[in-house]
Image: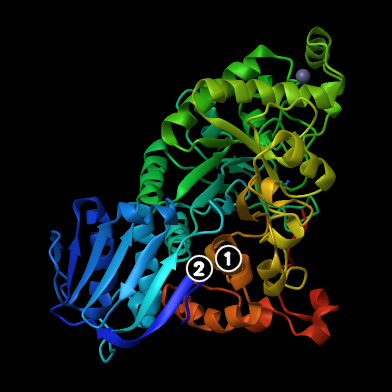
Amino acid sequence: MDIIPFPAKIERQAGELNLTPETGILTDTANRWNADFLRGLLSAPSGFPLRVRTGDRAAKNVIRLRLEPGLERLGREGYRLEVRPDAIVIEAPGTAGVFYGIQTLRQLLPIEIEERRPVSGVDWRVPCVLIEDKPRFAWRGFMLDEGRHFQGKETVQLTLDLMTLQKLNVLHWHLTEDQGWRIEVKKYPKLTEVGSQRAGTSITLLGKQHDGIPHSGFYTQDEIREIVAYAAERHIRIVPEIEMPGHSLAALASYPELSCTGGPFKVATHFGIFPDIYCAGKETVFTFLQDVLDEILELFPSPYIHIGGDEAPKKRWKGCPDCQRRIREEGLKGEHALQVYFTNRIAAYLDSKGRHVMGWNEILQDGLVKGAVVQFWARGRERLLEAIRIEKRAVVMSTYLDAYLDHSYSLMPLSRSYRYEPVPAELGENDAGSILGLEFPLWSECVPNRARLDYQVYPRLTAMAETGWTPKDKKDFKDFRRRLEKLLGRLDRLGVCYAPLNEAEPPKVRQWFGIFTIPQPQTGTVE
Ligand code: ACM
Ligand code: ZN
């Protein structure tokens, strides 16, 4: 059966069930939202009314949704799905599990189920099957960088819809960058008045020449609330990223007094790593960041708040009297220790509000507070292993050569993304639990619009979704490719401009020269 991610346990049974105009949905009260979601999904293409009733009676020709505490062994997200000739039953210990059971049922139905208009001539048949399923990892994420290019609400909602189909549960939302600040902060209006706009966009990844076309955009707090609620209904947690101390030029252009030198600065029109970062010596910087975080915490219920922490050059800190005074007064061993001080202070603030700090693996230095979650992307693998073994550090894996969706398919073909194993082979059974899961980030320097976004993300994110969910020993690339054809048919109907398989997996003979010979909409980037 062509299900992605492939279920943990699946048994094909004889027979099938036919959805008919008389088929009903029977739900307990806890799954009322799930029932309405299912109805919305099935009724548009089938034209069947699929009346939703609450209740607990046994009935024929129904899809039944119910909580079943007896299935606790399946965990918070697991479910059991049984399709019999007379009924479909989806049960789970929690509503998230029932929701994922619905996603599986969706993939057992003909691909026309993805149409949002009536489709005639389709047999709405579901093969009889018994599935008991649960995810391998708790963190199955996608990161969207909107600092470099603002995409807007519609694209984010479609992203959430596609994540839903693939049972992904974390949207890591990179909202601030050198090239743009994308979220309204009431106390600091210039962050969006100034910081959300730039004069142009570099026409190459590494050069400075820009196109002179202004780029702008940000989310109001009302829009953020709406998107967070939309995600939460779909059991997707949105983890916001507010970068600090580096990649912060848009904030410094808005409030130059937060820098070491006082500026002035412009929102960046080209890409790379910029020397001007938040000053770690001035108390006003911490007041500002805590105020910003107060508003972020109001908007995002996520237990984890990402603060970036990557690529923060120490040049300005070395020459800044305030930063140097901080180093002396705190007895710190130089500028790298100053970043640990910075991270720990923000971590303590978040901790006082009941949240955990999270950052890229550059934050992993001696003295980093215990609770800080590390997202691994590059360099320092030994350090990471040590932190897992000795400190039991919680980690999300995004190793850049396997996981960065901005890479070209020549450099990172679909098969490479599929084979990515997030648990380092060096770790024993006991330490593997430190790996919360995996996440594929899309850096958007070269992603100006949704078509390009779709092309970079799909089908590689689908490969990741299977690694995040399916037991390791059940993964099989050949079989995945076969099942993928069906899923791509669904993506066609959802209007997704994914990379076709011959481009997602460039032919072997040409792979070596791939960068030059396979046409790409634009060259991918290496961060
Ligand atoms: C990163 O790619 N700078 C996290
Ligand atoms: Zn400073």
Residue at point 74%, 15% (across, down): 281
Mark 2 residue type: Ala
Measure how far apart labels 2 and 1 are at the Cα level: 6 Å
**Horizontal side, residue 4 vs residue 234: left or right:** right
Report x, y in % for residue 393.
68, 37
Q: Quadrant of residue 259?
A: top right
Cβ of disc 1 within 8 Å of ligand 1?
A: no
**Figure disc tally:** 2
Query: Which of the two discs, 2 and 1, labels the residue nearer the N terminus?
Result: 2
Q: Secondary structure at mark 2?
A: loop
Residue at point 42%, 30% (across, down): 298
Q: Quadrant of residue 434?
A: top right
Mark 2 burial class by Cα count in 10 Å: few <14, some 14-19, many 20+: some
Mark 1 residue type: Pro
Report x, y in % for residue 420.
70, 64
Do the numbered discs 2 and 1 sit on residues whose CB atoms are within 8 Å? yes
User: Which residue is denoted by mark 2 in the rendering?
Assistant: 8
Residue at point 66%, 38% (across, down): 359
User: Which residue is denoted by mark 1 in the rendering?
Assistant: 471
Q: Vertically, is 16 above or below 228?
A: below
Nearer-the-camera pick, 112 or 101: 101
Q: Vertically, is 511 above or below 202?
A: below
Report x, y in % for residue 103.
39, 67
Q: Secondary structure at mark 1?
A: loop
Asked whether the viewer can see residue 204, the reply is no
Mark 1 burial class by Cα count in 10 Å: few <14, some 14-19, many 20+: some
Asked whether the viewer can see residue 298, the reply is yes
Report x, y in % for residue 188.
51, 25
Nearer-the-camera pick, 404 or 237: 237
**Horizontal side, residue 258 vs residue 16: left or right:** right
